Image (tube, rainbow, N blue to C red):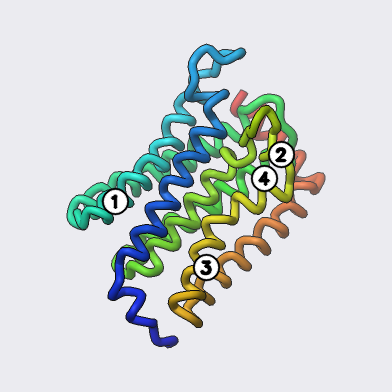
Amino acid sequence: MVPLNMNYYMKPHRDRYLFSALALWFLVITLNGFSRFFFISGYEYQLKFHLKLHGIIFSSWVLLFFIQSCLIWKKAHKTHKILGISALLVVPLIFVSGFYTSFAKTPTTPSEIGDNLSYLFAFTIFSLLGFKKRKVAYKHKRFMVFASSMLCSAAVARLNFMGVEIGRIPLVFYSLMLLPMMAVGFCDLLFLKKRFQFNFINILALVVILYASNILWESKTWSQISEYVIELIS
């Protein structure tokens, strides 16, 4: 096992600044990405009920992440643990809602459905790993950042800056989506030296999974499956 640089943990404010900044980042990204589609009433089209419910469920995770970060900042660890149970209950709701919405959303294509499912599965895996490692603070916090990054990918894709849909630009999308994970990896490299390999391995695994899944989503078999599921839930 690689020894930790304990000076990093002797100064917990570094962790608090980093993860509080990331919690605020997820909150701002979500508000920006979905302000025109969900948070601001009177938009040009009326959302269906399942989309409203979907928005509430997904937003609750981002809000919980922000609140949890504030609790750690105030050293309210007991409340943090209790609220963590609520977050665990949100995960299956997010999965079911995300799965249904991926197929029920119109207009859409099989590859778009597949992309949504890739990020949904990645979120679910990272969040469950985060709960499993909740007693190992180092891994727990990072898994939760990875999970939140996957969940906020939809918000990143809808980012608008001065009327320009910057989230639709692939380079901008992937850069902003991976930014929180890269920020954690950079800080670990800077303060924990070799410990950064934990983040590198997870990011590499994520990139490989997303790339491999894209091959599947472009296949004829997936097109047939997605069409069948769409007909089933229609």
Counting residues from the start of the chain, the first of labels 3 and 1 encountered is 1
Counting residues from the start of the chain, the first of labels 2 and 4 encountered is 4
Mark 2 secondary-structure assignment: helix
Q: Quadrant of the C terminus?
A: top right
Name the residue that disc number 4 marks.
115
Q: Inspect the image, locate mark 1, and give the three-letter code of the amino acid beneath it.
A: Gly
Counting residues from the start of the chain, the first of labels 3 and 2 encountered is 2
Give the number of the disc on residue 168.
2
Residue at (49% x, 33% y) in the render = 31
Name the residue that disc number 3 marks.
185
Q: Inspect the image, locate mark 4, and give the three-letter code of the amino acid beneath it.
A: Asp
Counting residues from the start of the chain, the first of labels 4 and 3 encountered is 4
Disc 1: CA contacts within 10 A as few (<14), some (14-19) or many (>=20): some
Residue at (73% x, 42% y) in the render = 169
- Asked if the residue at tag 4 contacts the one at tag 1, i.e. Cβ–Cβ closer than 8 Å, the answer is no
- Asked if the residue at tag 2 contacts the one at tag 3, i.e. Cβ–Cβ closer than 8 Å, the answer is no
User: What's the distance in space between the residues labelled 2 and 4, CA to CA?
Assistant: 14 Å
On the image, the x and y values in percent for residue 137 come to: 33, 67
